[in-house]
Image (spheres, rainbow, N blue to C red):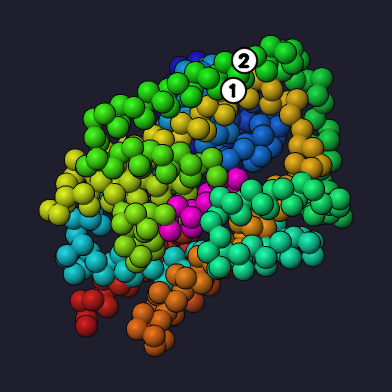
Amino acid sequence: MKPGAWKTWLLIGATGFGGPAGQVAILHREVVERHKWLDDEEFLAAMRLCMLLPGPEAQQLATYAGWRQGGVAGGLLAGTLFVIPGALLVTTLAWLHAAGEHLPLVAAAFAGTRPAVVALVALAAWRIGKKSLRSPAAVVIAIGALVALAAGVRFPLLVLAAGIVGFLLPFDLAPRAGGKDAHAAGTEAAIPVASADPASARGGSSIHHAIITATVWTAIWGAAYLGVSLLHLAGGRGADIAALFTKTTLLSLGGAYAVVPWALDESVARGWLAPAERFDALAMGEATPGPLILVVTFIGFLAGWKTDAGGAATAGLEGAAIATLFAFIPSFAMIFALAPLVRSIRPTSGLGRAMVAIGAAVVAAIVLLCLKLAVDSFLPDGQPALPPIAVAAVSALLLLRGWASTPIVVAAAAAVGALLQSIF
């Protein structure tokens, strides 16, 4: 492992704003251009693998780069430091939210972020929809998924059904006629399989490595889960938090937004979040560095805190730590198991169609979440609330034009909420 590598990974984790695209750009600058730990071909191959896997792709890409630099220890260091700054900040904000729930200005500040969150989710639906709904069949799948979700079909079942439908369809769901997609396809095709790492050239040994690694990480997960259960952490909710957020990561095919709506609904159903706190969880995930999946850290804190009527800070901290740990164990496991095969893995046409179909279902889930949040924010009493609508419109304009970053928009919305509270 290179001396001082930890400083680079900590810097990447602390400045990883802008979602996966921004985080991947930062990784490329530091890992490929500045330190030359990976070349462009291997970076692209690793990114392709991470995009196919469930879980936060930028964190997985950092873990892979760390593994290439310093083995398992390097991967653990890179992947952990990529997450820690955002996780600590989200935990701090969750503590402020919980402790200040009955303080008017704090409550108003958090309430002020909610219209901005509607704008953020709407833009995410638009951004992901443009990439995912590129054929009539994909649009039909998205509409069917939206109807199914509105009718009460559970998201995990919908993901499975969409994947099967996409895999079985006899035609391409996302034709690449030209432009950036054609260029990307040509770039991927130009990556020679023969340039794979020595480990990936030995198919049998790599598969054996994957099986052994998966077994070891499954044992690690089991031991951690047993410890959380026996110690009754997070006010006795630790085991449930661990199970839910492990499942959250495993279901997050196509990015965190694929599963965040489901995770929020599950948390509300369990009583860990109030319906309005869905806004706050999303605001924390969007406005802090690191993967969006860190919304689970916010949820975990509140799940622990709410086990005690007086508000148990210790249980909250335990809940945040458990949620974060179990959300990222699967990511480490998958990267360490598949890393030696990274250059030889190619998505088959059937797998590609399945991923596009799942992406269409994800768009439906995001649209439904946006509609629910919009109703809660804009029609709190069944009547249009003009200030939230105005804040959402201004937030959307600032983000679309690139005049302000997400953290600044969220902070400004919070300030508007606090100001309105102090005036009225």
**Residue pointed to by mark 2:** 209
Q: Disc 1 marks which amino acid?
A: Ala
Residue 337 — which label? 1
Q: Which residues are magenta?
A: 252-265
Q: Disc 2 marks which amino acid?
A: His
Is residue 411 among what the camera can see? no
| Residue 181 x, y percent position in the rendering | 79, 50
* Closer to us: 24 or 334: 334
Count of numbered circles on the image: 2
Task: Please tell me whether residue 259 belongs to the stretch shown in magenta.
Answer: yes
Placement of 217 over or under 13, stated as above or below: above
* Closer to us: 163 or 75: 163
| Residue 159 x, y percent position in the rendering | 62, 51
Q: Secondary structure at mark 1?
A: helix
* Closer to us: 58 or 355: 355
Q: Is residue 125 left or right of residue 238?
A: right
Q: Is residue 116 left or right of residue 37?
A: left
Majority SS type along the magenta span:
helix
Is residue 175 among what the camera can see? yes
Whole-angstrom CA distance, mark 2 to mark 1, is 7 Å
Crowd rating for badge 1 (residues with CA inside 10 Å; few <14, some 14–19, many 20+): many
Q: Is residue 310 left or right of residue 227?
A: left
Q: Residue at x 77, y 46 (%)?
A: 167
